[in-house]
Amino acid sequence: MATIGSMCLRSANRMTGITRLYILRTQQIRSNLKQCSTTATETNNASAASPGSKAEKTPEKPEAKPDQKVSAASEADDKFKKEKAKLEESVKDMKEKYMRALAETENVRQRMRKQVDDAKVFGIQGFCKDLLEVADILGKATESVPKEELKQENIHLKNLFEGLTMTESQLQKVFNKHGLEQITPAEGEKFDPFIHEAMFEVPTSKEEAASTIAVTTKVGYKLQSRTVRPALVGVFKTA
């Protein structure tokens, strides 16, 4: 019986020791947990106070070196200069094309104005050439009448001659009104190929008379300084 009692006592003591050890270990674990909780709280507060110390921090790009910055700026400047030169060349080309277009337009406008003015002035040129034949016939008719026949006894011929003369004079007035003038070169006048047409040559011994008008066979006409029909003449030539 004593043995059983001692065994029970030892078992009780052992249980008491285990209980005490468990209590000690539990208190130590609680202390460690409390300390860890305090440390974590302090760490979170410090992180909130300094944003740069976040756990997940964005990686910063490496800062460029001064040589790299200068090289990049130089490349950008060269590119800008090339673009500027290209734009200036384009503007210059467009300006030249614009000026040429203006010049061509002005030339066309002047030519058209001149053509219109010429059409107004010389539009009657063909009609005038046809009337010149009528003037020639009237001139030949008045020249063919003998002067001695123009007497009071031959009153009909005299009246006819006066009528032809008046008609020729009136026709010349109409010609002058529209800018059509006679070309009647005198003897000794310098030959001008623009208003004269040489039909034959008349020999002469005078050197100063060479290339001058000797005789006029048919009068010419010009319309507003433009020769419509040159005068038909004979020209002196040294023998």
Image: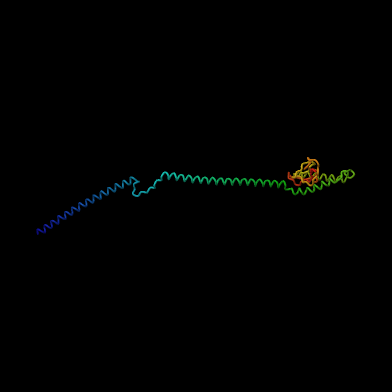
Q: Is residue 121 left or right of residue 73?
A: right
Q: Is residue 94 left or right of residue 141?
A: left
Which residue is farthest left? 2
The foreground one among 135 and 196 is 196
Is the image coloured rainbow, by chain, by secondary structure, or in one colour? Answer: rainbow
- The percent coordinates of residue 167 (x first, y second) are 81, 45
Image label count:
0
The foreground one among 181 and 19 is 181
Q: Is residue 187 left or right of residue 121?
A: right
Q: Quadrant of residue 237?
A: top right
Which residue is farthest right? 153
- The percent coordinates of residue 143 (x first, y second) are 84, 45
Q: Is residue 102 left or right of residue 39?
A: right
Q: Quadrant of the N terminus?
A: bottom left
The foreground one among 79 and 131 is 79
Q: Quadrant of the C terminus?
A: top right
- The percent coordinates of residue 101 (x first, y second) are 61, 47
Which residue is farthest top? 208
- The percent coordinates of residue 28 (x first, y second) are 22, 50
